[in-house]
Image (cartoon, rainbow, N blue to C red):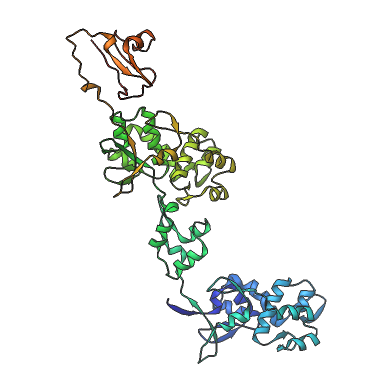
Amino acid sequence: MQKQLLWATKIHIQQNLSQAATGHIIDPKNNKKLTVDEACINETVDSADRDSLLEAEAAAVGYKDPYSAKPLSVFEAMKKGLVDDETGLRLLQAQESVGGILDPNLSVFLPKDTAIERKILDENTKCTLNQSPKYYIDPETEESVSYIDLKKRCKIEPQTGQLLLPVAKKLDPNKLIFDGVRKPVTAKQLIEYEVLDKETLKDLQTEKKSVPEVSADKRVNLKGTGPIAGIVTGKNTKISLQEAKKQMLLPVELCADLLLEAQAATGHIIDPKNNKKLTVDEACTDKTVDSGDHGRLLAAEKAAVGYKDPYSVKPLSVFEAMKKGLVDNETGLRLLQAQESVGGIMDPSLSVFLPLDLAVKRNILDTNTSHSLKKHPKCYIDPETDVNISYADLKKRCRTEPHTGLLLLPVKDKLDASKLVFNVSKSIDPSNLIFDGVRKSISILFLSTTGQGSQHGGAKGSVVPGPRLLGAQNWTHSINLY
């Protein structure tokens, strides 16, 4: 791991303060000792830090006593409430680590016992300093350390005698870019949203880990596990949801519509034949979906890219849109369930999936909605049973295509009514038309007497099964006998 010497003045503002408290700001490039004002003028320090550095410099030159012309030491300023105890101890520790307690009247460092004799320290404060309290931050480990411990890690530059703190070169977290669901996201943003931990960020900054490696570890957050991409028939034919609608392979059109909305709400419309992720506009252009569904799918896509708030430029999440009445509760809960089932609640500002607890913490969900989602509401339709089912349960029934990783929902082939040919030249005895019932065979003659053997207002002899019949012949289309 490449190292470079970074000046202590660049590491942390506390270390700038400690320099000021011990007498001077150090310009390491030119090997100069400067007052705070001089350091601000020549830009050794940021002028925005001037006030805080002047306060720290008072530890060396003395704090002003409103009732006396005599400058006050750090300890005396602490006693008068001009400096809080933690700040005072931190400045005293820095002074002690470079030579002793600084007497601003003499402008020299004194041993602690002498400082006590001169009443610029007391026994209690001496005991506290002897315990080496950890008031500074180690830039390498980001852990709290004492000033003397930091000094022990320093290297001495031979020609100047300056103490230089070795620090690993770190990459800027704003320049570590990850690929989110719909847009790039930085490592800094991922840390702020608790998607990455500090240890992982440190590994990225020191190049122990690469962005692709961490992306693989955080795939669920960054990309999700994927929605239901399409269906697979009994003949192992892969078909898009739009094509399944056209071929009437799903029992009701609504089943496919809801699954397409779930795709849009989780980031992309899936083209399973070409293994492509598309925006709704792209999917309509290349006819992966019907252009007649464009408006409805754009509305669902807002769950991923954000709803427009007329009073703010910030995109709204599904939950925020629900609160503002832009999305009804039933639709919102259905879209949220799809998101949670593929990775978490999607934050459109960040373009990543967040676990429920983090989503609540980020105010893109509340505890009540979280509880509702945990109950697995049945917002979708099972194409096999025509009953309501949760999105997660539908995903469990899917097959994963090995070479693409796409989730495909198995659906049985349906009989094509146009290929059902009957001999109409002979009269047919209705008692010979037998269907498989639940536990035994049943004739169409009996069905006709119960009102199940004729279509509503249809021609005589039309057959539409009323209750779903279980057995070899699972009819889904009308059969007309003439």
Q: Quadrant of the C terminus?
A: top left
Q: Nearer the viewer, residue 283 or 441?
A: 441
Look at 48% across and 65% down and name the residue there: 201
Q: Nearer the viewer, residue 90 or 17?
A: 90
Q: In the visual, does 429 lie left or right of 42?
A: left
Q: Quadrant of the N terminus?
A: bottom left
Look at 48% across and 68% down and name the residue there: 202
Residue 92 image-quadrant placement? bottom right
Residue 176 image-quadrant placement? bottom left
Q: Residue furthest bottom?
A: 159
Expressed as whole percent of the image width and height from the top left, the position of residue 212 reads 38, 61
Vertical placement of residue 442 versus 402, above or below: above
Q: In the visual, does 394 lie left or right of 330?
A: left
Look at 51% across and 60% down and name the residue there: 191
Q: Nearer the viewer, residue 156 or 104?
A: 156
Expressed as whole percent of the image width and height from the top left, the position of residue 308 reads 48, 42
- Count of residue discs: 0
Vertical placement of residue 448 versus 240, above or below: above
Examine the rendering and report whether any part of residue 122 can be seen: no
Q: Residue furthest right?
A: 67
Q: Residue furthest left?
A: 425
Q: Nearer the viewer, residue 428 or 96?
A: 428
Examine the rendering and report whether any part of residue 10 can be seen: yes
Expressed as whole percent of the image width and height from the top left, the position of residue 167 reads 50, 77
Q: In the visual, does 386 lie left or right of 31?
A: left
Expressed as whole percent of the image width and height from the top left, the position of residue 171 reads 44, 69
Vertical placement of residue 191 versus 376, above or below: below
Look at 70% across and 82% down and name the residue there: 61
Residue 301 image-quadrant placement? top left
